[in-house]
Amino acid sequence: MARAELRFYLNGEPVHVAGDEAFLTLSEYLRQRRGMTGTKIVCSEGDCGACSVILGRPAGGTIRYESINSCIHFLHQLDATHVVTVEGLSRNGALHPVQQAMVACHGSQCGFCTPGFVTTMASLFEQDEGRRTQRLTEEELRDALSGNLCRCTGYVQIVEAACSIDPASAPRMGELYPDKAMAAQLAEWSRDEVRVEGRDVEGNELLAYLPRTWEAAAAFKAESPETLVVAGATDLGVQRNKGRIAPRRILGLANIDGDDEVRIEDGVLTIGARATWTAVERAIRTILPDYHRILLRFGGPQIRSAGTVGGNLVNASPIADSLPFHFVTETELELVGTGGTRRVPIADFYLGYRKTALRPDELLRRIVARLPRGNEVLRLYKVSKRKNLDISTFTAAILVRLDGARIAEARVALGGVGPVVLRLPRTEAFLHGREIDEETMREAGRLARGEITPITDVRGRAEYRARLAENIFVKFYHDVAAEHAHAAV
Ligand SMILES: Cc1cc2nc3c(=O)[nH]c(=O)nc-3n(C[C@H](O)[C@H](O)[C@H](O)COP(=O)(O)OP(=O)(O)OC[C@H]3O[C@@H](n4cnc5c(N)ncnc54)[C@H](O)[C@@H]3O)c2cc1C
Ligand code: FES
Ligand code: FES
């Protein structure tokens, strides 16, 4: 029988939640229901990091901790996890070394952003390989703190504080909260199917179902078109906080067994739809450095630790950062429904602006991409107004198979230039068989302009996007030439 309450740990204490509380965001629950006001809410959109908490999930007999935004994370996503808030970092009245460093280096003025910085910085002393031995560097902090904004202190003192911490003094979460028994309990809870019911303020019935299998998930989805599938909620949480959606019948993917991993075998990259971007980042760092480079510009660390690959693909935004890579690697998507599974080439999955080929009972289960081979060169591009934590204006992937200096095959995908991500068949055909030189790529760019239909919006004018599409080919040429020149030295 399905369990009728959520079970998780909060700062080491077991918590059982049923009824309407299960449908709150974590930041609402902490502040309104638990009086834990250390966690702040500023933007409610995952942009500022003031609401950051540390989330522990069971991982192979232990617990893996990462920083997430509690303002866009629902309680029903927390079953079988351990939440550590800023209040949970100082034990027995003693400040955590990160908090001490912030005091010593004057890292806080109004203090509104401080709990978010502190929790995110504390999470940086977690790593899979055991205790960290090196001090944090300014360079790694630049990415690690890209999801945290401070409007008054300025970043110099905050970075100084983080760099001053002796890693030997910074406890891992497993030391603050011994994790053996807790990990076993979380693993046990995560084997349960959960069905929680409640009512909203207007008295409407609410239901959150967390199945264990994709088959049960598909059956539940098929029962009603009202069903809202929730994975990491980094898209849905924002929509709910802006009042665009008021979900009543939720299918949560949190307790499904498997498909949260990334595998690389025989030149094939298989990503479970439930895998977070942080899991992808860890898996592809060395094997796909260009994809890894783009991922470091994907949201901030808190977004990447919650947001999933499946959510990005099904959300079907033409500027989703992952899509151009999957178009040029001719990725296949494994969909699961009540009648079994089917594989769909990614180019057939997108039917129009934010419209996919998913049937009412179907879910995305796996993403299967062929990795570039030795004679294939791949470059990915993201253009946005800000470097960090910004939505793309334009994205591109160019993959060419080289036979000496000749292009044996070219695949090009552009995002932000039409209602869906586009492959450019005429430009690809033009490149086929030609020498790779600057003039060829310049001409390819001119052709590409004719294959796209960009629009003007808040992120850029149509002409700007058309120029980006044209110029990216010359940039690709110089990047590739530079790489080859570098390799020849
Ligand atoms: C501050 C911020 C920064 C961001 N930065 C970027 C960025 O740089 N680049 C970028 O591309 N995106 C960005 N995003 C968007 C978002 O983080 C990603 O799209 C993310 O991958 C969504 O995954 P999720 O698991 O959170 O999806 P959810 O919000 O849980 O779901 C998104 C959609 O997918 C559906 N869905 C999810 N999983 C499945 C499944 N397995 N089967 C069927 N349907 C499913 C849901 O029903 C919903 O319609 C950002 C978002 C925020 C808030
Ligand atoms: S309140 Fe700004 S990210 Fe949550
Ligand atoms: S200390 Fe005021 S916003 Fe950072």
Image (cartoon, rainbow, N blue to C red):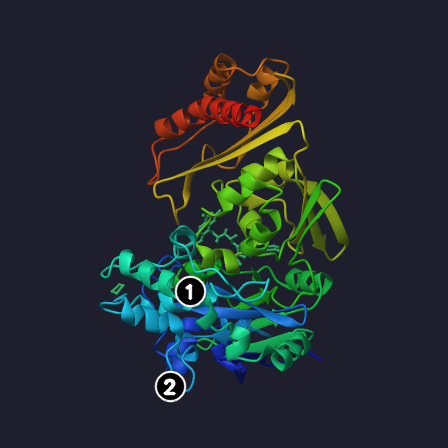
208 relative to 187 in the view: left or right: left
Q: Residues within 10 Å of mark 2 (few under 14, many from 20)?
A: few
Whole-percent x, y for residue 352 in the image: 54, 39
The residue singled out by tag 2 in the image is: 93
> Is ligand 3 closer than 8 angstroms to the Cβ of mark 2?
no
Q: Residue at x 51, y 76 (%)?
A: 22
Q: Is residue 58 above or below residue 94?
A: above
What is the secondary structure assignment of the residue under circle 1? Answer: helix
208 relative to 300 in the view: left or right: right
Whole-percent x, y for residue 204 in the image: 48, 74
Q: Is residue 206 visible?
A: no
Q: Amino acid at mark 1?
A: Thr
Snapshot quadrant of residue 104:
bottom left
Q: Quadrant of the N terminus?
A: bottom right
What is the secondary structure assignment of the residue under circle 2? Answer: loop
The residue singled out by tag 1 in the image is: 120
Whole-percent x, y for residue 214 in the image: 70, 61
Q: Is residue 431 above or below residue 96?
A: above
Q: Is residue 147 above or below residue 332?
A: below
